[in-house]
Amino acid sequence: QVQLVESGGGLVQAGGSLRLSCAASGRTVNNYSVGWYRQAPGKEREFAAAITWSGGRIYYATSVKGRFTISRDNAKNTVYLQMNSLKPEDTAVYYCAASRGAGALDRAYVYDYWGQGTQVTVSS
């Protein structure tokens, strides 16, 4: 069993930055691919970014590419999402998730464990 806890969310003005953290406990997350998803009010959960267990492959949604950076520190059992140049449309609850596999990481069904989410609000 893997428990995931997100942190780092908050209120920021447009153009600002936040760094989200996804800390794992229980089993190590080092052998898992980890993704970040987000869900805005009234919308479906959508993929934002993902990283394989080794960090060898990284994926981004078109909407965040060039602004968000996903990284991981396996020694700390933590995955990060650095978010720069934030826009009001980035406002959402952000979730991290862990998958035993390394394929189709933009599909929610491949993930085995999910965190509870952290709120990110970007004001205009």
Image (cartoon, helix red, strand yellow):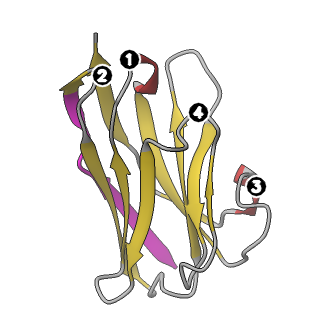
The residue singled out by tag 2 in the image is 122
Residue 46, position as x, y percentages in the image: 63, 37
Mark 3 vs mark 2: which is more N-terminal? 3
Mark 4 vs mark 3: which is more N-terminal? 4
Q: Which residues are magenta?
A: 1-11
Q: Is residue 13 left or right of residue 47?
A: left
Q: Which mark is residue 88?
A: 1
Determine the residue positioned at 28% across, 83% down. 76
Determine the residue positioned at 56% across, 87% down. 31
Q: Quadrant of residue 61?
A: top right
Q: Is residue 27 magenta?
A: no
Mark 1 vs mark 4: which is more N-terminal? 4
> What is the three-letter code of the residue carrying label 3?
Tyr
Q: Is residue 96 left or right of residue 98?
A: left
Q: Secondary structure at mark 4?
A: loop
> What is the three-letter code of the residue carrying label 1?
Pro
The residue singled out by tag 3 in the image is 109
> What is the three-letter code of the residue carrying label 2?
Val
In 3D space, how far apart are the residues under numbered discs 2 and 4 (Cα atoms)?
15 Å
Q: Are marks 1 and 3 in contact (CB under 8 Å)?
A: no
Q: Is residue 62 left or right of residue 40?
A: right
Residue farthest toward the front in the current orientation of the protein:
66
Q: Quadrant of residue 47?
A: top right
Instruction: Specify the principal SS of the magenta part.
Output: strand
> What is the three-letter code of the residue carrying label 4?
Ser
Determine the residue positioned at 48% across, 86% down. 30
Report the front residue among 29 and 51: 51
Report the front residue among 78 and 14: 14
